[in-house]
Image: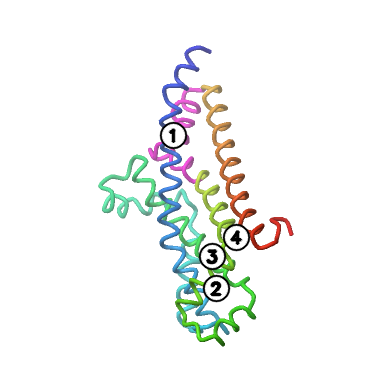
Amino acid sequence: MSSNLELAFRLLPLEIFNTLYMVFASAFFAILIGLPIGVILTITDKGHIKENLALYKVLGTIVNVGRSFPFAILMVALIPLTRWIVGTSLGTTASIVPLTVAAAPFIARLIETSLKEVDRHILEAALVMGSNTWQIITKVLIPEALASILSGITLTIVNLIGYSAMAGLVGGGGLGQVAIQYGYNRFNTFIMITTVAILIILVQGIQWGGNRLVEAILRKRGKHLYE
């Protein structure tokens, strides 16, 4: 037991950091990519402020194709791109590339769904007041849908924790690699259970934090998370 504890204290702090680094870095880049795509999907849809069904269908198809790839296949398929961007296909930094590509289409659809929930009467009022497209996006759509957007981002980050554990199968580092290399391959039940427990705690902590942020936004508007 003492040797297992020593191994855990030697490996886990760094790999917890690596997991959080992978997850939050990929979430950041996925939001940078997915947010504008989600906005474009919203405003170009039928009956919206910049209706363009041809663009909507093309962009929607690309997003759907991106969402359809299983992450394990996506990691392998993106090895050349990962090597081109990072210089290697192994390690925590390299894992950010497939994690970002996997999350971006997911975020785009979540943001589209959130923005489409904004009351049409609010949009019409903004148009009547002479607001341009940029003002409607930044001062009406995103602020009104912010709670829903944050809820979707929280869900994405939780999913990315699971994906990051999968990245450990191909040398991606993080808790997934500890579970595979030191737990499963060495039949070390203690390391396996400890790693899984930490992953559960991370998921619960991020979900709790995301819910608190959403609740704070809704409370300012006189609403409640579970209404």
Amino acid type shown at disc 4: Ala
**For residue 200, side relative to residue 16 (left or right):** right
Which label's residue is closer to the chain start, 2 or 4?
A: 2
Element type at marker 1? helix
The residue sitting at 62% across, 50% down in the picture is 211
In this picture the colour scheme is rainbow
| Span of residues in magenta | 163-187
Amino acid type shown at disc 2: Val
Can you tell which of label 3 and label 4 is closer to the viewer?
A: 4
Find the distance from the CA under tag 2 to the CA under tag 1: 44 Å
Find the distance from the CA under tag 2 to the CA under tag 4: 13 Å
- The location of residue 146, given as percent across then percent down, is 56, 63
* Residue 1, label in figure: none
Which label's residue is closer to the chain start, 3 or 4?
A: 3
Amino acid type shown at disc 3: Ile
Element type at marker 2? helix
- The location of residue 188, given as percent across then percent down, is 51, 22
Find the distance from the CA under tag 1 to the CA under tag 3: 32 Å
Find the distance from the CA under tag 4 to the CA under tag 1: 34 Å
- The location of residue 68, given as percent across then percent down, is 51, 60
* Residue 140, label in figure: 2
Which label's residue is closer to the chain start, 2 or 3?
A: 3
Residue 77 is one of the magenta-drawn residues: no
Can you tell which of label 2 and label 3 is closer to the viewer?
A: 2
* Circle 3 residue: 111
The residue sitting at 46% across, 48% down in the picture is 72
Which label's residue is closer to the chain start, 1 or 3?
A: 3
Classify 47 as above or below 112.
below
Q: Residues within 10 Å of mark 1 (few under 14, many from 20)?
A: many
